[in-house]
Image: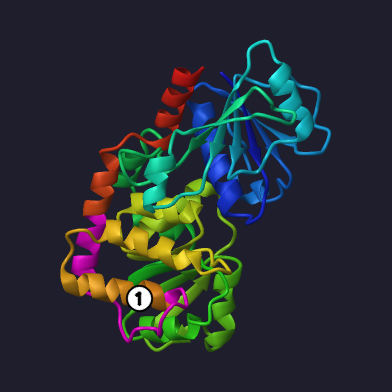
Amino acid sequence: MQWDLFCRVIDNYGDIGVCWRLAADLGARGEAVRLWIDDASALAWMAPHGATGVEVLPWTATPAPLEPGEVVVEAFGCDPPVEFVRRMALATRRPVWINLEYLSAEDYVERSHGLPSPQLSGPGAGLTKWFFYPGFSERTGGLLREPGLLGEREAFDREAWLSAQGLQRRDEERVVSLFCYDNPALPDLLRTLATQPTLLLLTPGAAQQAAPLLPEDGRLGALRSHALPWLPQPDYDRLLWSCDLNFVRGEDSFARAHWAGVPFVWHIYPQHDGAHAAKLDAYLDRLLEGAPESLVRELHALWHGWNGLDLWPPHLPLYRDWAQACTRWRDRLLAQDDLTTQLLRFVRQKG
């Protein structure tokens, strides 16, 4: 099928990251995708070689005069250009129109997934927009996971990948990646990590603001740090696989941290009304279902402290229990169909 996928860039990594992964996955499965985007600059490092079956087009008020494909996906309620919606309504065979929503573990996602929104007025009058929610249960649209991804993960050689980046892990040294928004808790994190041998890998952006907090040689106690360049998406996945602990942010890196199968901490996008706190706790409730009570308390304290919802805790949870909880959670998610598979099935049913 021909897909038109619309993406408006608000956060250069989350929204465009999700949209590019979806477009590339669809293309790899034989679909044709036109990715309409208002700022494609991040693709220069995120996907420098493009992807089979994917064409990138500029999003403007007057889009190129192309007929809509069989499927139109607006990511995160971004509303396609009015002229394009008008073409959708006039098409002989009207497309299946999908609003791909934000990822959340909150209960409303299961209630809202798959619901129709009939368009009663405006340029799209007569069309139906369908809500498609990613999520963590069988009653949602699942998570993006390319076929064969877990096979690649199992065959991955982290020492070889680190060596290719000019890095070498020392004996008894844990490897930690840091990808975050601006965070006042960063000095506390550095002091906590410095209590045992740690190689801290800093991604570009806010995470590399940690560098001025360290001595000139990038060392603090038992911690040494390394600033990474921008990484294409496949290499970012391998960064996550190389680490014993990952700090991730937003939506794209958060979802990918699950497939690494190692402990991670999520820096959720902060909202002015504080709604992100409930969203964070809804996710923790699912992640920690059946976990030891001590781990539940410690991870709540850690995630709340990192997200500015509480004081920073004095230590990290016991690694063994944390790793076991993450592995169990990943295995539960692997039992569900991935997002692209579910989306293809949903579109065929509605089309």
Q: Which residue is mark 1?
A: 302
Task: Name the spot of residue 299 as percent of width and height, x first.
Answer: 30, 71
Q: Is residue 171 in sight in this rendering?
A: no
Most foreground residue, 319 or 93: 93
Number of other residues with Cα within 10 Å of mark 1, as a class: few under 14, some 14 to 19, many 20 or more: many
Secondary structure found at label 1: helix
Q: Point out the residue furthest to the front here.
A: 120
Q: Quadrant of residue 207?
A: bottom right
Q: Which residues are magenta?
A: 306-327
Q: Residue at the location (57% across, 41% down)? A: 19
Type of the residue with mark 1: Leu
User: In the image, residue 329 lies at what x, y percent?
Assistant: 26, 52
Residue at 75% across, 35% down: 81
Query: Is residue 23 at least partly visible in the picture?
Result: yes
**Where the N terminus falls, by quadrant?**
top right
Drawn side of residue 91 relative to residue 212, left or right: right
Number of dots carrying numbers: 1
Instruction: Tell me where residue 303 appears, x and y as whole percent.
Output: 38, 72
Classify residue 322 by image quadrant.
Answer: bottom left
Residue extending farthest top = 92
Asked whether 173 or 96 is in front, the reply is 96
Q: From this view, report whether residue 206 is shown above or below residue 29.
A: below
In the picture, measured across the screen, residue 20 lies left or right of residue 259, that is: right
Q: Is residue 134 left or right of residue 43?
A: left
Q: Is residue 323 above or below residue 302?
A: above
Q: Who's the residue at 61% across and 47% down the image?
A: 16
Q: Is residue 203 magenta?
A: no
